[in-house]
């Protein structure tokens, strides 16, 4: 593009206070003084952006339809009530039952156990990095956390199954547990989520203005008090966002639970029991050879739909909470 | 703003008549003193060899061009510099003859006795009530009634009438001037002996500024106040004594280090400065 294609009228202000009288506007009067350079690039960029945005929407709607169509077919055969509140999940058996509660119970166990690990350690790491760590230490810690976040979940799954469950629980602690447990899966999932919670909450805490910390210190507060009573509440919106993202990841996490939690779908009543989560079921069943359009096939989508709705609800709660606690400094 | 207006040379006319210089003792009855104080940021010496005493129940103004180290010195008076990476104080700062940087001195206790109000109002994102109660809560102050403490502090800061019906509302709903008075109230609430103020009115409009100045006159009866100000009329209006600083370049490094040029009763500093640099600055020829 030729940069000089348009002429720029120049506004000359000649020593206004001088003796020459008012400043003269040069140039023929039919040329706008404010005519801009043509910017074709801007249109292209706008087009690309609009396309990307539209594509996202289309894909989301597509996924939704792909879930809903077989899902609805499923609910034609199985009453929704039996699905949501039934306590027996045996879709592959001849005597099939479609009560999803066993899967939900395993998901709740692994998620809660993961959060019990991830929230305190994640927030602790965030406070440490944002409020205590020397910038140099922080420069080391953050990348380490990010590496932790980058480990493939299948590796975590193996770690949970082979090390935590077999070595730690069975050999070292001599716990009364089988080959799988929701505890091993939940613990390791918690470790996996720590970086997510730590990193996002750390960003939120670092965004709290220094002036608030100074104000707190000037009133005789120590660092811990400043962190807990000023920085933490001020960053609460971001911290909630971090935790909810952690919850979403825990609910949706598949590989770890498929490997380490087991594949027996039954109501889980204790942490050392095995159990199959919703995601674990989908992963297992999707690998099977259920015929397209069969009830088994549609079952997958019914569970997928439920997972989708749960995640959606979590996100909606998240948006509510984040807005409620948002601070404008 | 009327700050540093060059065509208005400071004359004795700008000097506030009361409290008159005459009533002041020649030497302040200092509660807080600096002896040969240098403040460094890493290897950079920001302030050099300050000897200064801040008189009991007096208002002392620190004036001088930007970057001459007024804020730096102020922060060294209650160890707020501890929070700044690389900041270091040499020499002695003593509060009632005790070195505040001495061994065994708790910086937190120092800040409880020597409070600070900042340039930009910095209320916490909490309710008005919780902002005031904060200091008492974190320092574990014994209070018979927190409600009374809050009311008293807000009253002293001339803010009570404006906020008494919305104590539970966020402090962020207040105007800038109200927020700054809230910050003063918050400082008063922990009952310090000294209040340091770093350009407390620079973010405020003239009316809010006037209210804060009136408030300072009220407070000086019970507190020792040190105020950094850019506004020389303000120094002339509120301060009993004034210290003028400037920044001198180092011959070898070219770094500018702040030094105390002149210190005296405000009337004298503005009416008959001893140092040519002071005179140039207050008459707007420099800075
Ligand atoms: N946190 C800091 N780190 C390094 N240098 C600083 C810091 N704060 C201030 N300075 C430097 O110290 C000098 C004095 O600054 P300051 O005390 O803010 O001056 P004033 O308040 O008089 O405008 C300036 O040269 C400034 O750049
Ligand atoms: Mg300053």
Image: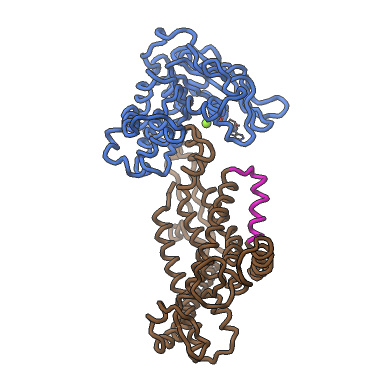
Chain colours: A brown, B blue
Would you say A176 lies left or right of B57 here? right
Query: Does any portion of residue B260 appear in the rendered image?
Result: no
Magenta-drawn segment: A132-148
Residue A232 in picture, x, y percent from top left: 48, 47
Residue A326's x, y, as percent?
A: 42, 53
Q: Is residue B15 above or below residue A248?
A: above
| Image quarter for ligand 1 | top right
Asked if residue B48 shows in the view, the reply is yes
* Numbered circles on residues, count: 0
Looking at this view, is B137 or B194 the one in front? B137
Question: Eyeballing the image, is B149 above or below B28?
Answer: below
A140 is within the stretch colored magenta: yes
Q: Position of residue B137 (x, y in %)?
A: 42, 35
Does residue B240 appear to the left or right of A168 in the view shown? left
Compared to A57, does B202 lie above or below? above
Residue B101 position within the rendered picture, expressed as x and y whole percent measured from the top left: 60, 24
Please state, as top left, top right, bottom left or bottom right, where the N terminus of chain B lies in the image. top left
Tell me which residue sits at (45%, 54%) in the image.
A237
What residue is drawn where x is 69% and y is 31%? B43
Q: Nearer the viewer, residue B175 or A15?
A: B175
Image quadrant where residue A188 sits = bottom right
Asked if residue B148 is among those painted magenta in the image, a careful observer would answer: no
Q: Main secondary structure of the magenta part?
A: helix
Q: Residue at x 35, y 33 (%)?
A: B146
Q: In the image, is residue A29 above or below residue B190?
A: below
Residue at 53% over, 58% down: A116
Q: Nearer the viewer, residue A119 or B72?
A: A119
């Amino acid at each position: 593009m030729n940069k000089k294609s348009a002429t720029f009228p120049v506004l000359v202000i000649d020593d206004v206070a001088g003796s020459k009288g008012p400043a003269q506007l040069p140039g023929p009067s039919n040329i706008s003084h404010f005519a801009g350079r043509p910017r074709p690039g801007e249109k292209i960029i706008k087009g690309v952006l609009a396309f990307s945005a539209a594509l996202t929407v289309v894909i989301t709607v597509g996924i939704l339809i792909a879930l809903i169509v077989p899902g609805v077919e499923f609910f034609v055969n199985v009453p929704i009530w039996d699905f949501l509140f039934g306590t027996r999940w045996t879709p592959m058996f001849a005597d099939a039952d479609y009560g999803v509660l066993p899967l939900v119970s395993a998901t709740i166990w692994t998620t809660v156990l993961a959060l019990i690990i991830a929230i305190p350690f994640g927030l602790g790491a965030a406070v440490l990095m944002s409020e205590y760590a020397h910038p140099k230490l922080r420069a080391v810690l953050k990348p380490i956390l990010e590496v932790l976040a980058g480990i493939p979940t299948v590796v975590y799954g193996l770690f949970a199954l082979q090390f935590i469950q077999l070595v730690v629980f069975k050999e070292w602690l001599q716990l009364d547990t089988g080959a799988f447990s929701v505890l091993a899966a939940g613990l390791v999932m918690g470790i996996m989520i720590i970086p997510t919670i730590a990193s996002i909450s750390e960003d939120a805490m670092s965004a709290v203005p220094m002036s608030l910390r100074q104000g707190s210190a000037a009133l005789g507060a120590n660092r811990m008090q400043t962190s807990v009573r000023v920085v933490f509440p001020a960053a609460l919106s971001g911290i909630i966002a971090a935790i909810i993202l952690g919850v979403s990841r825990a609910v949706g996490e598949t590989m770890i639970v498929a490997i380490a939690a087991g594949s027996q779908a039954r109501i889980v009543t204790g942490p050392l029991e095995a159990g199959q989560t919703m995601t674990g079921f989908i992963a297992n069943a999707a690998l099977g050879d259920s015929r397209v359009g069969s009830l088994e096939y549609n079952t997958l989508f019914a569970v997928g739909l439920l997972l989708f709705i749960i995640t959606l609800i979590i996100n909606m709660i998240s948006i509510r909470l984040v807005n409620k606690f948002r601070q404008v400094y | 703003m009327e700050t540093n207006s060059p065509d208005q040379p400071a004359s004795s006319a700008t000097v506030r008549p009361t409290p008159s210089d005459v009533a002041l003792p020649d030497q302040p009855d200092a509660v807080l003193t600096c002896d040969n104080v240098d403040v460094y940021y890493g290897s950079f010496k920001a302030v050099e060899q300050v000897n200064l005493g801040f008189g009991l129940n007096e208002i002392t103004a620190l004036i001088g061009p930007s970057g001459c180290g007024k804020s730096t010195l102020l922060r060294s008076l209650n160890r707020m510099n501890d929070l700044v990476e690389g900041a270091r104080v040499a020499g002695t700062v003593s509060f009632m003859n005790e070195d505040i940087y001495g061994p065994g001195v708790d910086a937190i206790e120092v800040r409880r006795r020597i409070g600070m109000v900042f340039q930009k109002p910095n209320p916490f994102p909490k309710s008005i009530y919780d902002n005031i109660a904060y200091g008492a809560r974190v320092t574990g102050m014994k209070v018979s009634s927190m409600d009374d403490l809050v009311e008293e502090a807000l009253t002293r800061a001339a803010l009570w009438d404006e906020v008494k019906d919305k104590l539970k509302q966020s402090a962020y709903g207040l105007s800038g001037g109200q927020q700054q008075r809230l910050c003063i109230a918050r400082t008063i609430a922990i009952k310090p002996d000294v209040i340091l103020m770093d350009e407390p009115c620079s973010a405020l409009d003239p009316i809010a500024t006037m209210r804060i100045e009136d408030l300072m006159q009220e407070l000086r009866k019970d507190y020792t106040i040190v105020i950094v100000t850019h506004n020389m009329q303000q120094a002339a209006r509120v301060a009993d004594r004034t210290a003028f600083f400037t920044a001198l370049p180092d011959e070898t490094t070219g770094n500018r280090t702040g030094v105390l040029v002149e210190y005296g009763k405000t009337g004298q500093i503005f009416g008959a400065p001893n140092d040519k640099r002071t005179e140039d600055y207050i008459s707007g020829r420099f800075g």
